[in-house]
Amino acid sequence: MKNDRVKKLLMISVSVLLIVLAAGIFFFNHNNKMVLEGPQGEIATNETSAQAWAKFYPAHWDSYQANYANTEKPSHFTAKPYLTAIYAGFGFAKEYNEPRAHVYTIEDILAIDPARKKAGASCFTCKSTQVPEMMQKYGEQYYLMSFDEIKEEFSEAIGCLDCHDPKTMELRLSRLALIEALQRQGRDVDKISQQEMRSLVCAQCHVTYYFQPGSKKITFPWDKGVKADQVLAYYDEMKFSEWTHPDAGSGMVKPRHAEYETFQDSTHESAGLSCADCHMPYTKVGSKKISSHVWQSPLNNIEQSCTTCHRNGIDWLTSRIKTIQSQVKQTQDLAGEAVVEAINELKISQAAANVDQAKLKEAQELHRQAQWYLDFVVVTNGYGFHNPTETLNNLSTAIDAAHKSAQKAREARGLK
């Protein structure tokens, strides 16, 4: 009888322990389950204030707020002194700073040197969630308005509405220039995959562009392709120049932050990665999974950005990235010196008596090419990491064209 009681007690105890263990596992898994942060209410259509989205997406809002810590905006001229000679005669020669956090876009654009404001209202096009509203309000006249005419109408920096549909939170394109560029390529913007959209929402701004003569409409020069040689061919066919270099006499075109174009066909892009995979990695906040909205270099959060795919260790990855970037910086500086040499030779030849105009024109064309390929790299964040092979190829092209320009300029005034 005693043994039977012991057996029953053991069976009851084991059963209770199993129930407690199962309950513990259930509640542990439930409380530690990674769930995407979802909407907690309905956001007003075309809500431009990022703060108004905060109560619906508090974890994402906290992430977005962390951008305020990125306050530094050193001058590019400190590390690249040759840029002042290269940009002579253009607004960038007066001021060209490293970008800081997206949350400061309105503050920074209002404080920019007056020489950079000649583009007018278009200066705000990548700086505020209110831009589509202003474009709808003023139509084509928006592009023709002056900087001072419209500046008081902008108060919101880059925010949620730039990339998200407020009702569904799906990624969406809000900038007309990108939509039109894709349509000219034969793309249906309503049938683009979610993964590609994770790059294209960035391509609304992180691209090169120009202002159409007359209308000043912002246009992406992608009709022949997105690479440096293809964009330059587009401009050459148009016989388009943005300014004449005052020392060299060359007709120049200016690339702008061509991150998206450079990233295309890179190792990472070809493997199916998007901008957001590295710059906005998924992170855990409590039991919630969010896409980080701290827009920064992946080097600042390399564990989340890189080790999901790369198993080589943080130290190896950091060393590899630094090696690529230092090689690009070194080659970029050599290209910068070569372009400045070409400018100096052209300046002398322009002032020389009996200069061979045909050779001078050829030297100026080579200068245009050299400076374009160099600047395509200079203006692109990351020191080449978005596409190391293409970046170094562009710099090699710049160096070669610059040396040829300098030599042809000397020949134009009778030197060998």
Image (tube, helix red, strand yellow):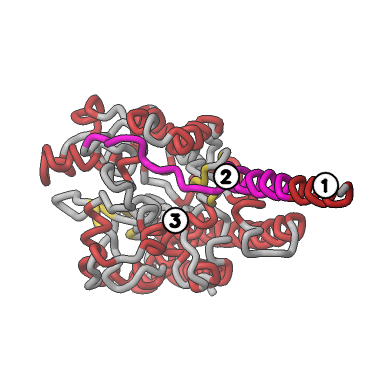
SS at circle 3? helix
SS at circle 1? helix
Tell me where residue 208 sits by quadrant: bottom left
Q: Which mark is residue 178?
A: none
Residue tagged 1: 5
Q: Which of labels 1 and 3 is toward the front?
A: 1
Q: Is residue 129 left or right of residue 58?
A: left
Residue tagged 2: 284
Q: Is residue 85 above or below residue 182?
A: above
Residue 259 makes an appearance in the image: yes
Number of residue marks: 3
Going by the picture, which residue comes out furthest to the top? 152
Q: Assign the C terminus to one quadrant of the image.
A: bottom right
Q: Residues within 10 Å of mark 2 (few under 14, many from 20)?
A: some
Which is nearer the eye, 16 or 63? 16
Residue tagged 3: 347
Query: What is the magenta segment's predominant secondary structure?
Result: helix
Q: Is residue 298 left or right of residue 255?
A: right
Residue displayed at 41% across by 36% down: 57
Point out the stretch of residues depicted in magenta: 15-44
Residue 18 inside the magenta-drawn segment: yes
